[in-house]
Amino acid sequence: MRARRPGLVALAGLALAGCGFTPLYGDAGVGSGLSRIAVTTQDDRLGYRLREQLEDALGRDAAQVPLWRLETTAEQSRRPLGRRIDDTATRYELTVIGRWTLTPAAGGTPLTGTETVTTTYAAADQPYAAIAAQQDGEERAAAELAREIRLALMLALQGQP
Protein backbone atom coordinates (compact mmCIF):
# COMPACT_ATOMS: atom_id res chain seq x y z
CA MET A 1 0.00 0.00 0.00
CA ARG A 2 2.82 2.44 0.90
CA ALA A 3 4.57 1.80 -2.40
CA ARG A 4 1.49 3.03 -4.29
CA ARG A 5 1.15 6.38 -2.47
CA PRO A 6 3.95 8.25 -4.29
CA GLY A 7 2.58 7.01 -7.59
CA LEU A 8 -0.95 8.16 -6.74
CA VAL A 9 0.31 11.58 -5.65
CA ALA A 10 2.28 11.99 -8.88
CA LEU A 11 -0.73 10.90 -10.92
CA ALA A 12 -2.97 13.39 -9.10
CA GLY A 13 -0.42 16.14 -9.77
CA LEU A 14 -0.36 15.34 -13.47
CA ALA A 15 -4.15 15.29 -13.62
CA LEU A 16 -4.37 18.74 -12.01
CA ALA A 17 -1.67 20.16 -14.28
CA GLY A 18 -3.52 18.97 -17.36
CA CYS A 19 -6.93 20.34 -16.39
CA GLY A 20 -5.94 24.02 -16.38
CA PHE A 21 -6.21 24.36 -12.60
CA THR A 22 -4.95 27.73 -11.36
CA PRO A 23 -4.64 28.35 -7.63
CA LEU A 24 -6.68 31.31 -6.40
CA TYR A 25 -3.60 32.87 -4.79
CA GLY A 26 -1.17 32.01 -7.60
CA ASP A 27 0.56 34.58 -9.83
CA ALA A 28 -1.91 34.00 -12.65
CA GLY A 29 -4.81 33.99 -10.18
CA VAL A 30 -7.07 36.78 -9.02
CA GLY A 31 -5.01 37.80 -5.98
CA SER A 32 -2.51 39.93 -7.92
CA GLY A 33 -5.23 42.13 -9.47
CA LEU A 34 -6.72 43.09 -6.09
CA SER A 35 -3.98 45.68 -5.52
CA ARG A 36 -5.59 47.85 -8.22
CA ILE A 37 -8.86 48.35 -6.34
CA ALA A 38 -9.53 51.81 -4.85
CA VAL A 39 -11.58 51.59 -1.64
CA THR A 40 -14.12 54.14 -0.37
CA THR A 41 -16.13 53.80 2.83
CA GLN A 42 -18.47 55.89 4.94
CA ASP A 43 -16.97 58.70 6.99
CA ASP A 44 -17.10 57.34 10.54
CA ARG A 45 -14.90 55.28 12.88
CA LEU A 46 -16.10 51.89 11.59
CA GLY A 47 -15.77 53.04 7.97
CA TYR A 48 -12.22 54.25 8.60
CA ARG A 49 -11.25 50.95 10.23
CA LEU A 50 -12.87 48.97 7.43
CA ARG A 51 -11.05 50.99 4.75
CA GLU A 52 -7.69 50.46 6.48
CA GLN A 53 -8.30 46.74 6.82
CA LEU A 54 -9.49 46.41 3.20
CA GLU A 55 -6.51 48.28 1.79
CA ASP A 56 -4.19 46.02 3.78
CA ALA A 57 -6.09 42.86 2.78
CA LEU A 58 -6.14 43.83 -0.90
CA GLY A 59 -2.51 44.99 -0.91
CA ARG A 60 -3.49 48.37 -2.38
CA ASP A 61 -0.70 49.83 -4.53
CA ALA A 62 -1.22 53.60 -4.66
CA ALA A 63 1.44 53.93 -7.39
CA GLN A 64 -0.79 52.16 -9.93
CA VAL A 65 -3.95 53.53 -11.51
CA PRO A 66 -6.97 51.71 -10.03
CA LEU A 67 -8.86 49.39 -12.38
CA TRP A 68 -11.79 48.98 -9.97
CA ARG A 69 -13.62 51.14 -7.42
CA LEU A 70 -14.95 49.42 -4.30
CA GLU A 71 -17.63 51.29 -2.38
CA THR A 72 -18.64 49.87 0.98
CA THR A 73 -21.16 50.69 3.68
CA ALA A 74 -21.20 49.09 7.10
CA GLU A 75 -24.04 49.02 9.60
CA GLN A 76 -23.49 47.83 13.13
CA SER A 77 -25.86 46.70 15.85
CA ARG A 78 -25.05 45.83 19.44
CA ARG A 79 -26.99 43.38 21.59
CA PRO A 80 -26.41 42.75 25.31
CA LEU A 81 -25.68 39.17 26.35
CA GLY A 82 -25.86 37.88 29.90
CA ARG A 83 -27.02 39.89 32.88
CA ARG A 84 -25.52 40.73 36.21
CA ILE A 85 -27.60 40.94 39.35
CA ASP A 86 -27.95 44.72 38.82
CA ASP A 87 -29.41 44.04 35.32
CA THR A 88 -26.38 45.28 33.38
CA ALA A 89 -24.88 43.30 30.51
CA THR A 90 -21.78 41.17 31.02
CA ARG A 91 -21.00 40.87 27.29
CA TYR A 92 -22.14 42.43 24.06
CA GLU A 93 -22.62 40.90 20.63
CA LEU A 94 -21.59 43.22 17.81
CA THR A 95 -23.01 42.44 14.37
CA VAL A 96 -21.68 44.32 11.35
CA ILE A 97 -23.36 44.07 7.96
CA GLY A 98 -21.14 45.23 5.10
CA ARG A 99 -22.53 45.93 1.66
CA TRP A 100 -20.11 46.40 -1.20
CA THR A 101 -20.22 47.42 -4.85
CA LEU A 102 -17.26 46.84 -7.15
CA THR A 103 -17.37 48.98 -10.29
CA PRO A 104 -14.86 48.81 -13.17
CA ALA A 105 -13.06 52.14 -13.63
CA ALA A 106 -13.58 51.90 -17.40
CA GLY A 107 -17.32 51.42 -16.94
CA GLY A 108 -19.37 48.31 -17.06
CA THR A 109 -21.60 46.20 -14.91
CA PRO A 110 -20.91 46.55 -11.18
CA LEU A 111 -20.64 43.53 -8.90
CA THR A 112 -22.39 43.67 -5.52
CA GLY A 113 -22.48 41.65 -2.34
CA THR A 114 -23.30 41.61 1.35
CA GLU A 115 -21.21 40.12 4.14
CA THR A 116 -22.14 39.75 7.82
CA VAL A 117 -19.74 39.42 10.75
CA THR A 118 -20.52 38.88 14.43
CA THR A 119 -18.12 39.29 17.33
CA THR A 120 -18.46 39.65 21.09
CA TYR A 121 -16.68 41.68 23.73
CA ALA A 122 -16.80 41.96 27.51
CA ALA A 123 -18.67 44.76 29.25
CA ALA A 124 -16.44 46.38 31.86
CA ASP A 125 -17.48 48.36 34.93
CA GLN A 126 -14.91 51.12 34.36
CA PRO A 127 -15.87 53.63 31.64
CA TYR A 128 -12.46 53.66 29.92
CA ALA A 129 -12.25 49.86 29.89
CA ALA A 130 -15.77 49.63 28.44
CA ILE A 131 -14.88 52.04 25.61
CA ALA A 132 -11.62 50.18 24.91
CA ALA A 133 -13.46 46.84 24.80
CA GLN A 134 -16.08 48.22 22.41
CA GLN A 135 -13.42 49.69 20.11
CA ASP A 136 -11.49 46.40 20.16
CA GLY A 137 -14.69 44.59 19.15
CA GLU A 138 -15.18 47.04 16.28
CA GLU A 139 -11.57 46.57 15.16
CA ARG A 140 -11.90 42.77 15.16
CA ALA A 141 -15.21 42.98 13.29
CA ALA A 142 -13.71 45.31 10.66
CA ALA A 143 -10.74 42.96 10.16
CA GLU A 144 -13.00 39.95 9.73
CA LEU A 145 -15.34 41.86 7.41
CA ALA A 146 -12.37 42.90 5.27
CA ARG A 147 -11.29 39.25 4.98
CA GLU A 148 -14.82 38.21 4.01
CA ILE A 149 -15.09 40.97 1.39
CA ARG A 150 -11.65 40.10 -0.01
CA LEU A 151 -12.67 36.46 -0.42
CA ALA A 152 -15.98 37.49 -2.05
CA LEU A 153 -14.09 39.80 -4.45
CA MET A 154 -11.68 37.03 -5.39
CA LEU A 155 -14.56 34.71 -6.16
CA ALA A 156 -16.44 37.42 -8.08
CA LEU A 157 -13.41 38.42 -10.15
CA GLN A 158 -12.45 34.87 -11.03
CA GLY A 159 -12.54 34.68 -14.79
CA GLN A 160 -12.60 38.49 -15.22
CA PRO A 161 -9.92 40.00 -17.47
Image (cartoon, helix red, strand yellow):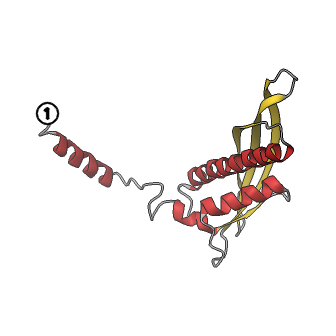
In the orientation shown, which residue stands out farthest toward the left? 3
Quadrant location of the N terminus in the rendered image: top left
Residue 36 can be seen in this image:
yes
Please tell me which residue is depicted at 27% across the width and 50% down the height of the picture: 13
In the orientation shown, which residue stands out farthest toward the top? 85
Which residue is more in the foreground, 84 or 58? 84
Residue 147 placed where, x, y %?
A: 62, 51
According to the picture, the residue beneath numbered tag 1 turns out to be: 1
Please tell me which residue is depicted at 64% across the width and 79% down the height of the picture: 63
Residue 72 placed where, x, y %?
A: 76, 54
Residue 113 can be seen in this image:
no
- When asked about the image quadrant of residue 87, the answer is top right
Residue 145 placed where, x, y %?
A: 68, 48
Few, some or many residues within 10 Å of mark 1 (<14, 14–19, 20+): few
Please tell me which residue is depicted at 56% across the width and 65% down the height of the picture: 33
Quadrant location of the C terminus in the rendered image: bottom right
